[in-house]
Amino acid sequence: MTADRPISELFVQQRPLRSLEFFPPKDDAGVETLRQTALALKRIAPDFVSVTYGAGGSTRERTAQVSRLLRTEIGFTVMPHLTCVGHTREELNGVADQLHAGGYRNIMTLRGDPPKGQTEFVPYQDGLRYGSDLVALLKARHADFCLGVGGYPEKHPEAPSLEIDLDNLKRKVDAGAAFITTQLFFDNAVYYRFVEKCRARGIRVPIVPGIMPVLSLKQIKRFTEMCGATLPHKLTKRLEAAGEAPEIVESVGNEWAVTQIRDLVAHGAPGYHLYIMNRAKAALALAAGLAA
């Protein structure tokens, strides 16, 4: 099995990278829809794509299925997500071995959210408690893994303070993470301050901004509440003015994201990661806007 190129080598090229995130659908019909979405998105030639990961056997299997589809059928460089949720150490080592044997060399390494119905994360049996533990385990198992980790420009909702959150992030980098992808944000000043604080902490790896084009005001309010991000007043007012007209809402969201990305790239961001919710239309509209 041919091994993927480490994403860390792409960052060395000193050009803005573009990546997309997919999530595994719940059924076979959804997989076929995702296949068509991925084929449509092939034309914008992302440098790599990621596939999210959920606890539970069927969800894990779907993640593996979607990763294979995107890698072998579509030809993308695929970065599967892996979390600590619901896994023993032995199981995590087994997943790592399977991914490595399958040619995957890039993994998005996350602690994961507490299982549904729980408010506090509790390690599974003899599993891992922190994302930094998972980074260390994967690097010890296969030193050639290139590992990405998550960063929260506005602080992880569970962290007592941004300073403590930055300390936790540095532990993940010190354990072997090669780059950071941020949670979504809508004010670039938040990202720039975050990068400054990271650099002051001695975190030197690339910090990729995560961008989500708004498709629905109700949806984006729910997402921002979950991850602790804020919606700028100006953006909220524009979305409210669009009302229930989805095409206008998407146009507003696309314009905002294009403006964000142009500014980020102009200020030296190493690229951008698009949270597209398995929607080709939003990503294609963004690509067209950025090409204009």
Image (spheres, rainbow, N blue to C red):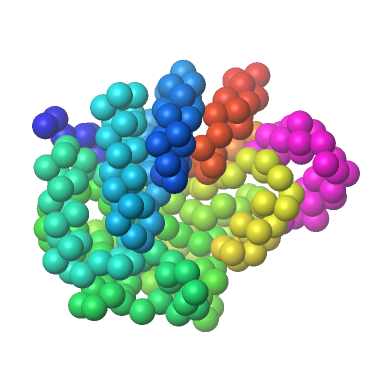
Tell me the residue at 34%/45% (across/down): 62
Region of the chain picked out in magenta, as a range? 231-257
Q: Is residue 153 left or right of residue 199?
A: right
Which residue is drawn at the image coordinates 54% and 39% (left, top)?
276
Q: Residue at coordinates 20% horizontally, 61% vertically from top-left?
A: 92
Classify residue 90 by image quadrant: bottom left
What percent of the width, then of the height, locates residue 98? 15, 48
Point out the image quarter for the C terminus: top right
Query: Height in image: 222 above or below 158?
Result: above
**Residue 86 location, x and y as percent?**
30, 68
Q: Main secondary structure of the magenta part?
A: helix
- Asked where in the image residue 104 lies, by quadrant, the reply is top left
Tell me, yes or no, whether the highlighted magenta stretch contains residue 236.
Answer: yes
Q: Of residues 171 and 34, which is closer to you in this image?
A: 34
In the rendered image, residue 1 lying in the magenta stretch gets the answer no
Evaluate whether residue 132 shows in this view: no
Please name the residue shown 40% across and 76% down the image.
121
